[in-house]
Amino acid sequence: MDPEWLRSVAWAFARWPDKDLLYGARIVEDSAARHGVPSGAMPRMEWLPYDRANLEFANYIDMNAIAHRAGLRQARFDPSLRSSIEWEMLLRLTAEHAPLELPVIACLYSNFAPNRLSDLATCSIDNNIVRSRAHTTRPMRVLCYHDPDFLQPDTDIDDEIMALHAQGASVAFAMRDHSVSHDGVRQTVFASYEEAVAAHVPDIVIVYGASHALQVLEELERAARPFALRTRSLDFDIEYVERIKAHPYCVGVWSYPCHAASVPGAHGLVPILAPPVAAPEPAVERALVAAFSAALPNDDWPHVLDAMDQITDLDRLVVLAKTNGQEHVAHEMMRQAAARARPVRVRADIPRSEISALLARASVALYTVAPDFSAGMPMSVIEGMRAGVCVITPDLPEMRTLCAAGFRPYRTAQDIVAHVRKIAAGGPHIEEERLKNQEHVLTTFCDPALGQRFHAELAAAITAWRMES
């Protein structure tokens, strides 16, 4: 240790009271020597500017050249490592704040000591372990690459990402195209994937939708970043998912539990409503029957209109979400509704805040899907239950699981009408159903543990991918 090093450390910490960590320079006796064999090179001074990206790739700050204030929580070694322990600790110590670069000689370093850690056979293995999990020593950087088609029909995208943000992740969005619908995203949105990767430097990219992932595979390959596939209700296709899962940059698939069972190795993850926002106070009189549609060809539109024709004594509303490339579907639905003898009111592209207000005065939320289509876990059903609404859904196994005690299935328009009449009549059993719906959503979809698990699974998947590659 240089005789003036400790004096310099004391001076620096007194001069910069906001700094908890610093490092100085070292004189290396023979930097080219290997395994105790001199190279004949001159001694060299090593002191480089701090760069977090470079530090995550390789350690260039020697243990003998760092100093920190006492009592730092991260100032400890990882006992699972045989070597590289100072590098791993330094990554944690610099996770939130850069160290002070002190231009002072800290030590004289000799290459000729026996039993050096860097000469251990396990050194390269430990180096790879530390490098592979560097993202766990600081906020994980997540980039969500989505197709704008999905934002309005699947409003949980933003909630899922906010759940990761609540775990400390740094999050941004990239869009493939301008959305014709409201997105409601609360994080930074980049206009292109290339721009997002360059600016955000993500540890992982979450690609939403199997068909979207196939369309952008070349972009993902050019960026050479690991990506995770989050499948959606609207385009789940086992053949698509398997093709994407086999890609060398894919670290894993996250699907709704009803779909994950058909994908070996997939992570089952329900939609996350996090952080939970207080639902609007329910209206004194609930007299609205609202049908929610993503305005896609898989909608069971005839049953909706046939049922609405028979319940004209109640306020009826159809809420449509415009979808990129499918705008004609919404226009056709509106045309058909207007052509009925008793036209139902139709509103298109309503922001999520307004939908919440509508649900507060709704007695029924109707979700429909055409036969032979999988419903998945539609957000309109979940948000309806969260608002204390009785929901009517197709008679499908996944809907029985999703709705639990509040399962009201239909196969015909007459089934829908019968449910509406029973709900409109009210009574203690209807109020109990509403409360059970709310409790089911709070315990199943608003649990903070969901975000914690998602974050941990992504971090572990990145580490495993880096170790293998």
Image (cartoon, rainbow, N blue to C red):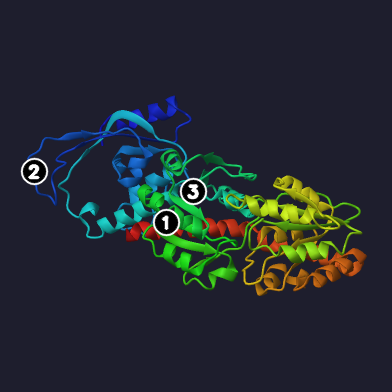
The residue indicated by pointer 3 is 142
Residue type at mark 2? Ser
Residue under pointer 1 = 462
Using the image, determine if residue 196 lies above or below residue 391. above
Seen in the picture, residue 345 relative to 16 is either above or below; the reply is below
Q: Position of residue 122 (x, y in %)?
A: 26, 60
Q: Residues within 10 Å of mark 3 (few under 14, many from 20)?
A: many
Position of 5 compared to 429: left or right? left
Q: Are marks 1 and 3 in contact (CB under 8 Å)?
A: no
List x then y, in percent, for residue 324: 59, 49
Q: What is the quadrant of residue 234 in the picture? A: bottom right
Dot 1 amino acid type: Ile
Q: Residue at x 82, y 67 (%)?
A: 433
| Residue under the image location 28 percent in, 59 percent down | 125
Residue 12: image quadrant is top left
* Nearest to N terminus: mark 1 or mark 3: 3
Which residue type does callout 3 highlight? Answer: Val
